[in-house]
Structures are given as C-alpha cells and as structure tokens.
Image (cartoon, rainbow, N blue to C red):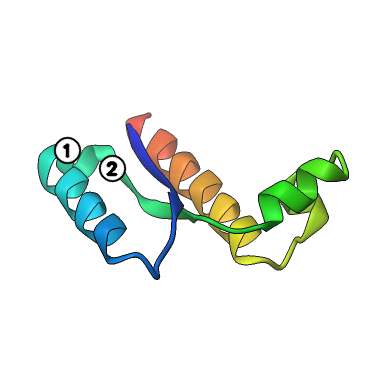
Amino acid sequence: RVLVTMRDARVTLQAEYEAQMRAAFGREVFQTVIPRTAVYENAASTHKSALQFAPSSPAAHAYRALAEEVRQLQAKAK
C-alpha cells in the first residue's frame, strides 16, 4: 500500500504529485492523506504522539481515519 504523507493542501504541485500517484497505483493508495502540520514537531518536543498532544487536530483525525481504513481493509481480506 501507498500512503500520502506530509501533504500541504496549499501547494499545487503536491496535489499534482498525489494525482500522479493515484493514477499510477490506483487502489493501492490509501484514501486517507496525512497532512503536513506543525503538530508533529510540537508533539515530538513533548515526547508525545500527535494523538496525545493534539487529539482534535487535523493530524490526529487523519491518523484515526487511516487506522479505520486499515481495519476495514483487514476485515474485507478475511
């Protein structure tokens, strides 16, 4: 599987790269996209995960969505 990470929605070129990845790898690309945010750096400085540091942040929501997507894929594989 392919995961799009550190995606900055303000950067047009990144949207183009993501589209190319989706075109090339199709369903192998997770639907969830992990955004670029300062939460990661701030969380690391406190020795916490993004989920612990800022549980309502876009980063935390994205990681929860990824976990749910993985869970659903595993359930379908059974």
Q: Quadrant of residue 54?
A: bottom right
Q: Quadrant of residue 62?
A: bottom right
Under mark 2, the amino acid is Val
Q: The residue tagged with tag 1: helix, strand or loop?
A: helix
Residue 36's place in the image compared with 25, above or below, is below
Where's the C terminus, which quadrant? Answer: top left
Q: Residue at x 46, y 40 (%)?
A: 70
Q: Position of residue 49 (x, y in %)?
A: 76, 44
- For residue 25, side relative to residue 13 (left or right): left
Residue picked out by circle 2: 29
Q: Residue at x 67, y 66 (%)?
A: 57
Q: Nearer the viewer, residue 29 or 19?
A: 19
Q: Quadrant of residue 25?
A: top left
Q: Residue at x 54, y 45 (%)?
A: 67
Tell me how far mark 1 sits from mark 2, CA to CA.
Answer: 6 Å
Residue 63's place in the image compared with 71, above or below, is below
Mark identifier at residue 60: none
Q: Nearer the viewer, residue 19 or 51?
A: 19
Q: Position of residue 51 (x, y in %)?
A: 73, 52
Under mark 1, the amino acid is Phe
Q: How many marks?
A: 2
Residue picked out by circle 1: 25
- Label 1 packing within 10 angstroms: few (<14), some (14-19), many (20+): few
Q: Position of residue 6 (x, y in %)?
A: 47, 49
Q: Residue at x 34, y 31 (%)?
A: 77
Q: Are marks 1 and 2 in contact (CB under 8 Å)?
A: yes
Q: Nearer the viewer, residue 47 or 28?
A: 47
Q: Residue furthest right?
A: 46
Q: The residue tagged with tag 2: helix, strand or loop?
A: strand
- For residue 56, side relative to residue 53 (left or right): left
